[in-house]
Image: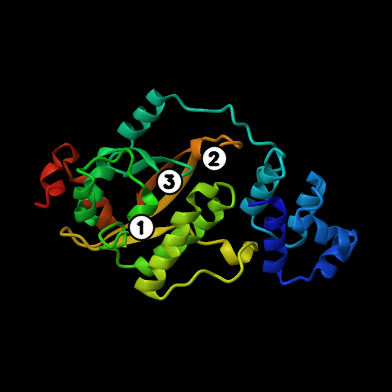
Amino acid sequence: MRAGELLKMARQAKGWSQLELSLSLGVSQRHVSFVESGRTRPSKELIVGWMLAVDAHPELLRAALLHAGFAAETGCGAATDSRQSFLPESVRLLLEASSPMPLVVFNGSWIMSGMNAAGKWLASEVMNVYWRKLDGVAAGMNMLDAVIDPDGLLSAMLNAKEAALALALQAQRESWINEAISPAVDSIWSSLSRRYGITAPRRFGSTGKLDEAPCRFHFRSRFGDLSFQTVQSVLQHDADHPVRGMRLEQWIPLDRQTQAVMGRQDFAGCRPAMQGA
C-alpha cells in the first residue's frame, strides 16, 4: 500500500473532501490530489500535519511515514529505536518467571515464538481441539488462524463477538504497515461475518473509529468461568521489517475465581488436559 493511499484513507475516515483538507493544511487541492494518487511524494512534515489534521490513528501515521521512506514516529515524536532487543535467554527467563499468569511471545505477523507453561495449560483448556491439531506445540502457531478456526480461540469464549471485533481491528491497523498479514485480516472479517454478523467498518483511519478497550477474554471451562485482560508490550521492534518485531502479551486474571484456578494448577503436569482429559 502506498503512502498516498493511506493518507487518502485517513482523509475519508474524517469525512473531509480534498478541498477541506487543503484549506486546513494551507496547500492546494491539486497538491492533495497528486499526493493521494502517488504523483507527488509527500514530505515528512506534510504527512504528520495531514494525519494530525484528520485525527488519524497513530498506527496509520506510522504506516504512512514508513511507506513514504521516513523513519516512523512514536507517540511522543521520537524516532523509533530499532536497535533495542532482548536476548533469547532474557525472553526465556520472562516466560519462566511469569507463571501462574499466561504469557506469550509473537512477532509482527502474529506467529508465536514462545508460550509459558500457564499459557499452554490455558490453551489446552479453552481451545482443546485446535491445540491438539498443533500437537501442543506453541512455537510457529499462527495467532490469526487461531481466531479464524472454528475450534480456535473463540470456540469457548463467552464474549466471542466483542473480543473478535477488538482482535480484527488490531490486526487491521497492523496490516497498514505489514501487508503480509492483509490476506489473514480479510479472512478474519469473512469469518466474523459468517459467525457473528460482524462486517468490516466502511472507513478506517480515525482515532475514534479504531481505538478499542484492552482485549478482555471470558471463557467457560471445566473449572468454571475464567476471565483475563491482555496487555501487550514490544520487546523488539524493527521499523523497516515489522515481521521481525517481537511482542510479549500478558494475560492478567480479572477476578478471584480466575486467580484461584490459575494459582492451584500444576502446569508441569498439563499433558492430560492437552490430550483432552
Does the residue at mark 2 contact the one at mark 3 (Cβ under 8 Å)? no
Vertical comparison of 71 with 133: above or below:
above
Residue at x-position 80% and y-position 53%: 39
Vertical comparison of 170 with 116: above or below:
below
Which circle's residue, 2 or 3, is located before the other in the chain?
Answer: 3
Q: Residues within 10 Å of mark 3 (few under 14, many from 20)?
A: many
Question: Quarter-wise, where is residue 83 in the image?
Answer: top right
* Callout 1: SS: helix
Q: Mark 3 sits on what residue?
A: 110
Q: Residues within 10 Å of mark 1 (few under 14, many from 20)?
A: many
* Res. 242 mark: 2
User: Can residue 41 be seen from the camera position used here?
Assistant: yes
Q: Mark 1 sits on what residue?
A: 147
Q: CA distance from mark 2 to mark 1?
A: 21 Å
Which circle's residue, 1 or 3, is located before the other in the chain?
Answer: 3
- Amino acid type at mark 3: Trp
- Amino acid type at mark 2: Pro
Position of 244 with respect to 20 (left or right) is left
Vertical comparison of 32 with 250: above or below:
below
* Callout 3: SS: loop
Q: Residue furthest bottom?
A: 197
